[in-house]
Image (cartoon, coloured by chain):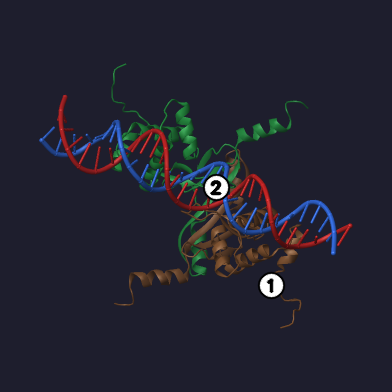
Chain colours: A green, B brown, C blue, D red
Amino acid sequence: MPCHHQDDAPLEIPALLKKYHLKVTRQREGILTALLAHHAPMTAEELYLSLKAAGENYGLSTVYRTLGSLEQCGVIEKAFLPGDTSQYYRFSQRGHRHHLICVGCRKTVSIDECPVEQFSVAVGEKNGFTVTGHSFEIFGLCPDCQALKKEKHDPQEK
Amino acid sequence: MPCHHQDDAPLEIPALLKKYHLKVTRQREGILTALLAHHAPMTAEELYLSLKAAGENYGLSTVYRTLGSLEQCGVIEKAFLPGDTSQYYRFSQRGHRHHLICVGCRKTVSIDECPVEQFSVAVGEKNGFTVTGHSFEIFGLCPDCQALKKEKHDPQEK
DNA sequence: TCCTAATTGAAAATGATTTTCAGTTTCAAT
DNA sequence: ATTGAAACTGAAAATCATTTTCAATTAGGA
């Protein structure tokens, strides 16, 4: 197979790295690709293990460092899940500030609207605060996880 | 000063502990009192240090354990602050699910309304999710911290 | 008062994340 | 293509928050 340039790549990871003056390394490409493919927030450890399972054995500290640099550039962002204190990372989605997150598998759906922007500023003003931001995430069980849960309770018998 | 029973105590901590079958100890009373007095979310370490400063030198593990038991009873709850991965605790406020939190000093104002309940359920349904909850917190600078910040930038000269 | 289970403190253990440092790699400039 | 400086990496050590262990103490009912 000849090595030709792919115009149709869904996201040019090398270009993205260059844009932020980060060197393009095998590790960074692998980490970003894995996170991109996962479609749900992941911890550094999860990324490390999934890469290892795929035969890409990078240092755990490299995973942490890469996530850290990418966060500083604003390419990815931290996410916190209810009842879980570990730090998850996901691609930051400009304009998509809010999400519907499955508490079972962490699958994430972006919500386009923001129903609280005006409300937040109003509440801030009423209390003399300068509002700098807000958090709003919806948690629930996705269809797949609902099915899984049902299976567990009624193991295919009446 | 005679030792008389205080009817006007703002919150009967011993009674609260007994209600949840927790023994009434000096440590637990001290920890709850300190958290109650602070009017803002605190970490275990902060509680430990503030108690120590007040001459009450309890083990850090006791602080952690006490916070853990009280959380299990639902007396207090965890809170997460933006850009900070440590676990904060605050009294749980039934019905006050949302807050306006100062990012400078963590002073907290409870918000009575919930402008996102219906919206959350609707978004969940649209995506086939069973909604189990949502998070919504507003962040900003309180009047005091705004003043402090201004001082820093213009150190009282023109 | 006495007894037992709950609680405590100190220290060790754990788990997540960060830092250190020597060796390697990228990439811009030759 | 080669080179060199700066950036990056991996492994191990360090750090930080939190939890657990365990022997000694304490609360509160009998």
Q: Which mark is residue B144?
A: none
- Res A100 → quadrant: top right
Q: Residues within 10 Å of mark 1 (few under 14, many from 20)?
A: few
Query: What crowding class fits label 2: few (fewer than 14 Cα within 10 Å), some (14-19), or many (20 or more)?
Result: few
Is label 1 in a helix, a strand or a loop?
loop
> Would you name the residue on which mark 1 appears?
B10
Seen from the viewer's position, the closer of residues A36 and B9 is: B9
Residue A85 badge: 2
Q: Position of residue B105 (x, y in %)?
A: 49, 65
For mark 1, name the chain. B
Q: Residue at 46% across / 46% down in the picture?
A: A78
Residue at x 39%, y 42% (from the top left corner): A65
**Mark 2 falls within which chain?**
A
Quarter of the picture holding the N terminus of chain A: top left
Position of B68 compared to D28: left or right? Answer: left
Tell me what residue is drawn at x 61 percent, y 33 percent.
Answer: A144
For the C terminus of chain A, which image quadrant?
A: top right
Mark 2 and mark 1 on one chain: no
CA distance separating discs 2 and 1: 33 Å
**On screen, residue A73 above or below A149:** below
Q: Position of residue B83 (x, y in %)?
A: 46, 53
Percent across and percent down for residue B52 are 56, 66
Q: Position of residue A113 (x, y in %)?
A: 49, 49
Residue B71: tell me if it is visible: yes
Q: Which amino acid, mark 2? A: Thr
- Specify whether residue A92 is in view: no
Please tell me whether mark 2 sits on a helix, a strand or a loop: loop
Q: Amino acid at mark 1?
A: Pro
Residue at 74 percent of width and 79 percent of height: B3
